[in-house]
Image (cartoon, grey):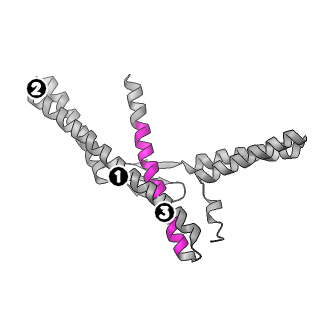
Amino acid sequence: MSGNNSNEQQPSTLGSMLQSAAGTIQSGIGQLTGSGKDVNAGETKKVAAEQQNEQSHATAKLGPVTATADGAAHVDNKDRQQGAWDQTIGSGKQFIGGVVGNETLKSQGRAQYDEGVRRETSGQASDLVEGLSNRVGGAIGSMVTTDKNVEEAYRQQHDDGKAAVRSVQHDLQKQAEAEQRSQ
């Protein structure tokens, strides 16, 4: 197994969970033994874990490109992009059809919108599966190799997978917020 500490320097969801658990245990032991030093150290670990978890989820999305805090990037699946476009055009056709009283145009717009939703959802599922697969494969691969170049390639695979997952999460969150505002 590799002894590289690069994963300790990068924000990690799993790492933050483990650090939080260690902090909780250390703080609990400190409370049981009356050691204020252990309680403080445990609480400090829990705060650091929360910050690491937030950094792990930090992303920036501009159009179809998502970048993560660790420098990875992901371009959305073409079906996601085309599906979003079809929804926009379909909504426009529905609106115009309603304004001018053209039921055919309105119906075509609804069909194009629905196809856009289906296509975007399919692309999201594809990106999510690929992202999760890359995250797991990269994490496991980097743990079992001793070659630094191979380890770096696995780390990049993991990070690229993380960017894909965060991209889908970002879009789903945005959709949920839009639905909530419309209710």
- The residue lying at 57 percent from left, 70 percent from top is 144
Which-is-in-front pick, marks 3 and 2?
A: 3
* Left/right of residue 128 with respect to residue 123 in the rendered view: right
**Amino acid of disc 1:** Ser
Q: Measuring from the top left, give residue 86's x and y in whole percent.
A: 23, 42
For label 2, the residue is 103
Q: CA distance from mark 2 to mark 1?
A: 35 Å
Mark 3 or 1 closer to N-term? 1
* Left/right of residue 120 with respect to residue 108 in the rendered view: right
Does residue 72 appear in the picture of this structure?
no
Q: Are marks 3 and 1 in contact (CB under 8 Å)?
A: no
Image quarter of residue 131 = bottom left
**Mark 1 secondary-structure assignment:** helix
Near mark 1 (Cα within 10 A), the count class, few <14, some 14-19 or many ≥20, is some
**Mark 2 secondary-structure assignment:** helix
Does residue 114 appear in the picture of this structure?
yes
Write the start and end of the magenta stretch as one range.
150-174
**Mark 3 secondary-structure assignment:** helix
**Amino acid of disc 2:** Glu
- The image's mark for residue 126 is 1
Q: CA distance from mark 3 to mark 2?
A: 51 Å
Mark 3 or 2 closer to N-term? 2
For label 3, the residue is 137
**Amino acid of disc 3:** Gly
* Left/right of residue 11 with respect to residue 173 in the rendered view: right
